[in-house]
Amino acid sequence: MAAILKGCIFDLDGVIVDTARYHFLAWKRLAGDLGFEFTEKDNEQLKGVSRMTSLDILLATGNIEKDKAAKDRLAVKKNEWYIEYIRKLTPADILPGSVELLEELHSHGIKCAVGSASKNAMLILERLRLTDRFDVIIDGTRVNSAKPDPEVFVLAAREMGLRYDEVIVFEDAVAGVEAAGRAGMKCIGVGKPEALRMAATVVTDLSELNYSKLIKIYGS
Ligand code: BG6
Ligand code: MG
């Protein structure tokens, strides 16, 4: 029997809210402290990637080596600056179409989850006043392996009580699209089609989607 769509798993950063800018500003400031330039193009490699892997990529960009203790201190510093920015988020920062889609999915009995690599996801959702709109929230504090490992999505489906073929994932990052694929979940890319070739469909933002379009993509 064909599976029926029962759940949606949303990545947070880049799908529901554009926090990449704030990650960039904080990483750029850290690079500046360490004495090298970090560009917006360099920052593209950090999308969807965990905090410590992002730091490793940043240090490699500056050709800098640090031991574990120094890296931990740098990551804390960057996160303090990042939190200064995200504390200022308001519901006006929610990306177009997100609330409408969540409401429509809810009215059709589709469960919704967040599947994010970020350890700041709860704070961001709180600032956006979105916490209560999700049945399940799995963030970077709940997983051992970061995307492209599928753990975050596997946990989200499990907590919703759904099989992997009953959900669709929404992702803006290559690592996230790969993670959904590895979990055997259909994925809609949010962003640029060139970057997200492995996704079933790519949209610019969630305002391009509604329940009936999702059902078509799910069944295709
Ligand atoms: C992802 C972002 O959602 O979360 C990455 O796309 C970020 O850029 C990662 O590095 C971890 O976020 P945080 O908030 O735990 O540093
Ligand atoms: Mg993302």
Image (cartoon, grey):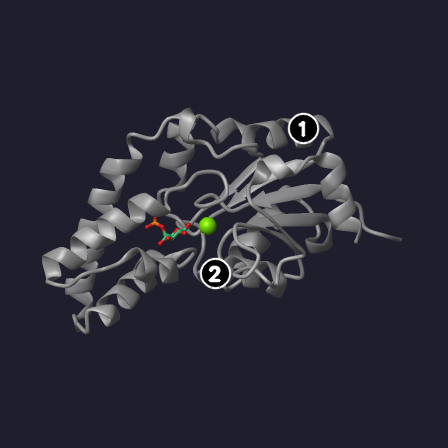
Number of numbered tags placed on the structure image: 2
Quadrant containing the C terminus in the rendered view: bottom right
Residue 40, picture quadrant: bottom left
Report x, y in % for residue 63: 19, 74
Asked if residue 168 can be seen in this view, the reply is yes
Report x, y in % for residue 205: 55, 41
Q: Is residue 163 above or below residue 150?
A: above
Amino acid type indicated by mark 1: Glu
Q: Is residue 56 above or below residue 200?
A: below
Report which residue position mark 1 lands on: 104
Asked if residue 76 can be seen in this view, the reply is no
Q: Residue at x 59, y 45 (%)?
A: 9
- Calculate the distance from the C-alpha at mark 2 to the C-alpha at mark 1: 28 Å
Q: Is residue 135 above or below residue 75?
A: above
Q: Is residue 189 left or right of residue 164?
A: left
Give the residue at the far right of this rendering. 1
Report x, y in % for residue 49: 40, 59
Mark 1 Cα shell of 10 Å, populated few (<14), some (14-19), many (≥20): few
Q: Is residue 187 left or right of residue 179?
A: right
Say which mark, if any, is on residue 166.
Answer: none
Q: Residue at x 34, y 30 (%)?
A: 89
Report which residue position mark 2 lands on: 147
Q: Earlier in the sequence, mark 2 or mark 1?
A: 1
Q: Secondary structure at mark 2?
A: loop
Q: Nearer the viewer, mark 2 or mark 1?
A: 1
Amino acid type indicated by mark 2: Lys
Q: Secondary structure at mark 1?
A: helix
Disc 2: residue Cβ within 8 A of ligand 1's nearest atom: no
Mark 2 Cα shell of 10 Å, populated few (<14), some (14-19), many (≥20): many
Q: Is residue 24 left or right of residue 164?
A: left
